[in-house]
Amino acid sequence: MDARDAERGAPGPPHRPPRDAGGPKGSPDFAEPPDSAATADPAKQPDSAESIDPAAPTDFIRTIVAADLREGKNGGRVHTRFPPEPNGYLHIGHAKAFSLNFGVAEEFGGQCNLRFDDTNPVKEDVEYVESIQADIRWLGYDWGDRLFHASDYYEQLYAWAQTLIGQSKAYVCDLSPDDVRSYRGTLTEPGKNSPFRDRSVEENLDLFRRMRSGEFDEGASTLRAKIDMSSPNMNLRDPIMYRIIKASHHRTGDTWCIYPSYDWAHGQSDALEGITHSLCSQEYEIHRPLYDWFLDQLALPQRPRQIEFARLNLSYTVMSKRLLLQLVKDGLVTGWDDPRMPTLCGMRRRGYTPEAIRAFMGKIGMAKRDSTVDLALLEHCVREDLNKRAPRVMGVLRPLKLVLDNYPEGQVDEMELVNNPEDPSAGTRQVPFSRVLYIERDDFREEPPKGYFRLYPGNEVRLRGAFIVRCTGVVKDATGEVAEVHCTYDPATRGGNAPDGRKVKSTIHWVSMAHAVEAEVRLYETLFSVPNPGDDEATGGDWKSVLNPNSLAVVTDCKLEPSLRDVQPGWYCQFERLAYFSVDSDSAPGRLVFNRTVTLRDSWARAEKKG
RNA sequence: UGGGGAGUCGUCCAGCGGUAGGACACAUGACUCUGGAUCAUGGAACCGGGGUUCGAGUCCCUGCUCCCCAGCCA
């Protein structure tokens, strides 16, 4: 438990001093929870999920790991790794992979390494290296001092490649990229041997050395494993181990101009790190024979076992890095951390909590079949978590003036509101009440539809935590729009309870006009308007055509209760009756910007829609 | 039409020869100073066809469907 828990209960919402941005790309540092001695947080807003302790899941992978342990394999060790390529930001699908790897290690008393699979300098960047680490930490996982890079192993990999050449199991091939492709054959026809396949060991060694020294141009030659050009498994048709790339690498600079392929680097890196279980997504299943083949040739004592699982798909979003990159590059979103993105930084900015995401990971299961998880499940997890800890506050998004004709002009009454009905220890706060208020436009209808029991002429509602009021009439503007609603309040109902025991069907939120704080609020919907935007058949091959035009709605001039004046980026809350929100990093002193994290379930909206 | 995977409520996951279960979603009701939350109830599935068995989602045969592999990407 966090020590900050002890600070709960003090009135008033949390505040915290402005700080320098700390995250990648100038995104705000969300790691600091609100802190202020005077106004302790009504809800704990921790910076990571370290305290999470979900019931140990069981699935086919954990079953295998447990069996390996039982059989005494690997000397009783469990050691996993998460191997991202630093070529993009992590998304919720990666979270499935790394929570599996870190989770399995934790549960079996083992360790999990973080290893950057940085074998392609043209696609990789330190920006990604940094964001990846920040995102994993945010979810509460820790790799200790075991941060590695495939590039740490370049020299060893090179030596091992020479070993394979020495065994006549690898050769330098001078075929052009086009020729390599045509010699490879097709899915149904075997390939042909490269004319360079039978070069002598000495010649291969010499050529390989000269490849490394930069003597040849990009594309001029490759080092290939000598396996079987007629294998039905395309990966075994003399796969490329090294290619010439004359680009500077974010870690090794210009020391290398040949770079190992994924297949050649991965298993060997696993072995070098003593990985026992190499958990990866299913598209690598067909690579497993090659993974094992390399390990066999080198006769390494350590034998990692690759196990594959189905990657995560989420409805109404895309998970492909290529598409996400394109969204960013084409300016279809504001960046990798756009709150509509399925990236972890996007979700963080939107207000999703690490606890919610971890809970989600526990609920989606682990299997091998292709599947698409309903976004509603993720949203459920976010609500479930925030419901327990988000402070309740009042904010009016689309203000409508409400005048209490019998309330004394100039009078201000401080009303005591509970911060979180789900958590008594969150305490209460004072909210100023006066004659002229703002209420939500949606909470008034001049002509109420059937089943509507909010405000309408003649009806009585409760103003949350304040008084019961009755609508006496409206004032319209020149266009016939309702400009103000007039009510009388019942002074005997202070606090919201009617001494005569009469029931009012509705309670609505309000903000005192004289005390209101203005804010911009960004309302999000799904980025795509169809459940399966990544499916070409569903989109006619044009995924951009199914972008949701309503994915972002900016509402300005929202009116918030004054206690929110100084909240800082990353702080989250529930605007009662509407949704959970978090303060966006675009906020500045005197300019509040909120993101709608996830709406509350709204059974009235649904009922009204159904008619 | 090569090879590798996979098919269980609308969705996701369990079930490993013995009454098909959970979660989300959906519906209905209760409760409520958030039409929130909570609680209760309900509908809802074994890809098809054969076979083995007292008994098959599970084993066998067969068919069908879906996903992945022809990057010097990972």
Image (tube, coloured by chain):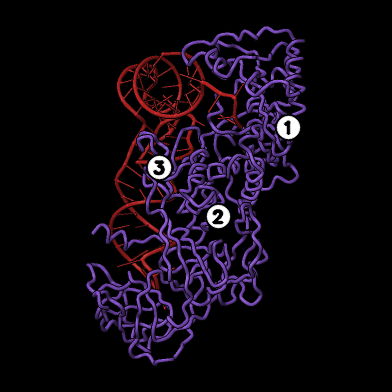
Chain colours: A purple, B red
Instruction: Indicate which label's residue lies in the foreground, 3 or 2.
Output: 3
Residue identified by numbered label 3: A544
Residue pictured at 39% horizontal, 84% vertical: A436
Residue identified by numbered label 2: A348
Q: How many marks?
A: 3
Residue A497 percent location from the top left of the image:
39, 82
Label 1 sits on a secondary structure element that is loop
Residue A567 percent location from the top left of the image:
56, 70
Instruction: Indicate which label's residue lies in the foreground, 2 or 1.
Output: 2
Residue A496 percent location from the top left of the image:
40, 81
Label 2 sits on a secondary structure element that is helix
Cβ atoms under marks 3 and 2 closer than 8 Å:
no
Residue pictured at 48% horizontal, 45% vertical: A330
Residue pictured at 61% horizontal, 51% vertical: A139
A290 lies above or below A4: above
Q: Quadrant of the C terminus of chain A?
A: bottom left
In-image side of A562 versus A122 (left or right): left
Q: Are marks 3 and 1 on the same chain?
A: yes
**Residue A274, numbered label:** 1
Foreground pick, A282 / A105 = A282
Spatial CA distance of label 3 from label 1 is: 44 Å
In-image side of A76 versus A191 (left or right): right
In-image side of A454 versus A163 (left or right): left
Label 3 sits on a secondary structure element that is helix
Residue A425: tell me if it is visible. no
